Amino acid sequence: MSDQNPKYDPLQQKEVIDDMFENWFLDYASYVILERAVPAIEDGLKPVQRRVMHALKEMDDGRFNKVANVIGSTMQFHPHGDASIGDAIVSMGQKNLLLDTQGNWGDIRTGDGAAAPRYIEVRLSKFANDVLFNEDTTEWQMSYDGRKREPINLPAKFPLLLVQGVEGIAVGLSTKILPHNFIEVCEASIAYLKKENFQLFPDFLTGGMIDVNTYNDGARGGKVKVRARIVEADKKTLIIKEIPFGTTTTSLIESIIKANDGGKIKIKKVEDNTAKEVSIIVHLAPNTSPDITIDALYAFTECEVSISPNACVIIDEKPHFVTISEILRQSTNQTMHLLKRELEIKKHELKEKLLYSSLEKIFIENRIYRDIEECETFEAVIQTIDKGLDPFKKDFYREIVEEDILRLCEIKIKRISKYDSFKADELMRRLEQELAEVEDNLLNLVRYTISFFKDLLKKYGKGRERRTEIRQFEAVQATVVAANNQKLYVDREGGFIGYGLKKDEYIMDCSDIDDIIAFKRDGKYVITKIQEKVFVGKDIIYCSVFRKNDERKIYNVIYSDGKSGASYAKRFFVTGITRDKEYDVSMGHPKSKVLYFTANDNGEAETVFVNLTANSTAKKKQLDWDFAPLAIKNRSSMGNLITKFPVKKVVLKSAGKSTLGGVDIWFDAVIGKLNRDEHGVYLGNFGSEDRILVLYKDGQYELTNFELTNRYEPREISKVVKFSPDRVISCLYFEGENKTFYIKRFKIETTTIDKKFLFITDTKNSRLLAVSTDKYPRMSLKTKADKKAPIETQAINIDEFVEVRGWKAIGQKLNVYDVVEVKMLDPKPEEVEVKQETEPVSEGQIETQQEAADNSDNQLALF
C-alpha cells in the first residue's frame, strides 16, 4: 500500500500556530521582564547590573581594573553581548555612587559618550562594599552554563533603587523610577523606622528645577515638570546654568535653534560655553523682553520637559506597580532584616570564640594535656580530654563535640608554654562585652538600624546635597509668550483673514499659534485659529488677536435691531468661547446692523454723535451718547435703548477715559510671578503710571512695571511691594571693608525702571542682613560686644536709631562686634508717640518680644 500525504488542514495549522505563539510569546515576555528590563526590589538592580557588581567583587583587590576586563569577567555570568554590559557599567559609573571611575567616562550634561572600555578603569566604591556584599547573607544560584555561582540578589542594605533610578522597556511593560537624593532617602528611612511621616521627591545630577505637585509618589499616572535654570545676565543676554533631566546641552541648543527658526522665539545667537559647569549663552534680538523670552524658552524648547514616572519592580518573581514610599518601606525593612542576620551570625561567631577560649583555658590551666601523655591510641587521647572537660561542660552554652576536642589537640607545645592567663582573661572579657553589645543591638534592632543609616549619612552624605530645586511652576501660555512671526491681513469685503493675504489690508503682527476674533457688519462674530487664509464672513468691520480671559478689553457697540428698527448701545467683554462658533452681538434678526464699533484695551468709554435720518419724525435729529454710564455686561445682553427712530450714522465726538479704574495685582512668591487671580500677597491697585519696587537679598533695588509676564526669582528677592515715593526703606547690613554693621533708612530717589541700584556698600564681603518696608519697624538683635563676650539681646526702634537719608548714605554705625541673630518685632503703631531714646530691655520684655517676633507676619526680610 503506497504512502499518502496527509491532507493540509488550515484550521488545525492555525491552532498549532496560535498555541505556539501564545506559549512562546509569554515565555519570551516573562524572560525579558524578569531577566533584562525590570529591577528587583531586593537590591534595586537589573540582572546585568547585579552581575557586573558580582564580577567586580570577585576581581576586587582595591586597585582599578580596565572596564574591558570587567566586561570579560561579567560575561561568565551574563548570557548576552558585551555591549549591554559595557553600557550598564558606564551608566552606573556616571551616577557616582557604586563605582569609583578613572578616565573619560563621558558627560551626562553634554551627551558625550565614554571612551572605549580598554581606556577607562573602574573599581567598587567604599559605599558599595559597605552596603552590597556579604558572603554569609547572600543567596546563590548557578550561572547560565553551570560553571559558576552567582547571587540571586545582592544583600543590599540601602534603597539603591531610589537613589540610582532606573528606566527599562520590556515586552508590553515598562518602568521608570526617577533618582532621588541620597541624604533625603537616608532621612526618610530613619523617619519610617521612627514611625514618622516622610515624603520623597526626585533629585537629578543635572540640577535644574522641578515641580512635584502631580508626582503622585512616583506611581503610574503621576507627572513632574523639570526646568532649566535660566538667569538674566543683562537685558540682552540670558544664561542657562542647569539643564533638565533627560536632556543634554546639545539637544537643548538644537531645540532653541529650531524654535528660533520656527519664529516662536527671537534670538540673535546661542553659544555653548559649558566646561566644568553648564553655561549656554542666549543672545536676544533687539527690543526683545528677557522675561517673555524665558517663558518662551520654557514653552517651546527643551528648557522645560514633562516626565511621567512609572514605578514597576520585581517582587516575588512578578512585576508589581508600586509607589516610591512602598519601595522605601520594603527596602528599609530588608535592611533591618539583613542587619539582624549579620548580628545573629556575629553573635554565633562570638559565642564560638568564647567557647573555644574557655576550652583552651581549661585545657592548659588544668594541665589536661599532661593526661594524654600515657595514651597509646588517638581514640584514647580524645576520651581522656573529654573526661578532663566533664566538670566544666555544664557551663558551656552547647554540647562539646569531637571537633572541639580535635582543635585542642592541635595546640602546639610552644603556645602552651607561653600561655598567658591574664591576656586570655582580657580577651574573654572583650569578647563578652562585644557579645553583650551584639545582644543589645538584637533586642533594639530599630535603634541599631537607625544608627546604621546615620552612619551612612556621616560617611557618605558630604557633597550629596540636593541639586534640583523643588519649585511650583506657573503655567506658561504659549500664545502670550510666542514671538510675532506672522502678519495678520484682512479682506473686509470678501470676508477673508490670514497671514497669506499680503496684497490686502495689514492689521497687526501676530504669532502662527494665535487666535483671531473678527466682527462683521451684521453683528456676527467668530474666533478662529490663525491660518494662511480663512473665510469668516463678508463685510468685516474689526479683527484682531484674541486674548482669552482678558476682562479689560471692552467692546463698545451701537446696533439697529432688524425687527423693531430701534438702536441699542452696549458694552461687553469676550473672555472665552467655542472656537469657530458664530455668535451675535445683536438680538439675532437677519436685518440687524452694527452702526458703531470700537475695541478698547483698557475699557475706555467715548462720547459719540448719533445722527438720525432726514425723514425721521423726531424733533431732534442729532443726539449725544456717552458710553461711560453704561454697565459692562456679557455679550448676550440686549443693551440700552438709544432711540426708536432710524439712525443715519454714528460718529465719534470725543475720546473717553477708562471706566475700569486701576488693576488689582497680587504677587505669588512661590513662583515669582504677578497675577490678577488673587494668588499670594495683594500688592495694591495699579494705574498706568504705577510701579513695583523689588528689594533683592544682595542689597539692590529695582523698579519695574506690573506686566504679568515679569519674572522675579524667589531665591534672589527679599520683598516685592507697590512703589511709593514716600515709602521709607530700612535695612541692616554688614560693611565688608570696615567689618562694621550699619542701619540705614532711605527713600527711593531714582525713577529708571528695569535697572538695579545697590543701596549697601559695594566692597568685598558686604552683605544685607535684613530689610523692612514698615513705617516704624523694630528689630531684636542678638549681639556680641567682642569675640569672647557673652551674647546680649537688644531691641531697636529703627526710626529712632537713624534718620532718613539718601539711598547712597552709609547709615548709622551699630557698635557691636558681631550680630548673631536678627528677629523682627511688631512695628510700632503709627499713632504711638515716638520716644527719644532706646530704653534697655529687661529679660521678661525680651522673651515677650521674641515670642512676638516668632509669630510676626511683618515686613522684615531676614537672611
Image: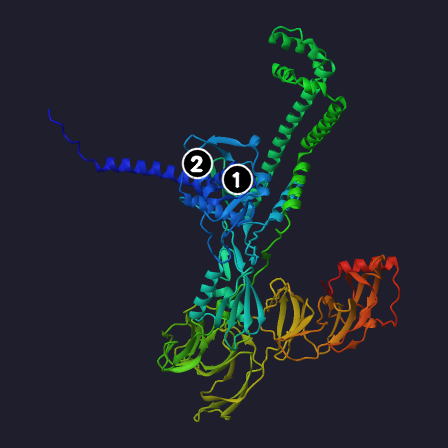
Looking at this view, is 708 or 306 the one in front? 306
Task: Where is residue 118? Give x, y as percent.
Answer: 45, 47
Q: Nearer the viewer, mark 1 or mark 2?
A: 2
The N terminus lies in quadrant = top left
Instruction: Give the amino acid type for the residue marked by disc 2 in the picture.
Output: Gln
Q: Determine which quarter of the picture holds residue 350.
A: top right
- Of the numbered discs 1 and 2, the one sitting upstream in the chain is 1
Question: Tag 2: Cα neighbours inside 10 Å, few (<14), some, or many (≥20)?
Answer: some
Instruction: Give the amino acid type for the residue marked by disc 1 in the picture.
Output: Ile
Task: Where is residue 515? Give x, y as percent.
Answer: 44, 71
Whether residue 212 sits left or right of residue 119 in the image: it is right
Q: Is residue 108 above or below residue 487?
A: above
Residue positioned most to the left = 1
Whether residue 49 sits left or right of residue 783 in the image: it is left
Task: Check residue 41 in the rendering and tell me which mark sits there, or answer none.
Answer: 1
Task: Where is residue 96? Give x, y as percent.
Answer: 55, 49
Looking at this view, is 103 or 586 the one in front? 103
Whether residue 852 sits left or right of residue 46 in the image: it is right
The C terminus lies in quadrant = bottom right
Count of marks, rendered view: 2
Task: Indicate the secondary structure of the residue bearing disc 1.
Answer: loop
Looking at this view, is 831 or 757 the one in front? 757
Q: Which residue is mark 2?
A: 76
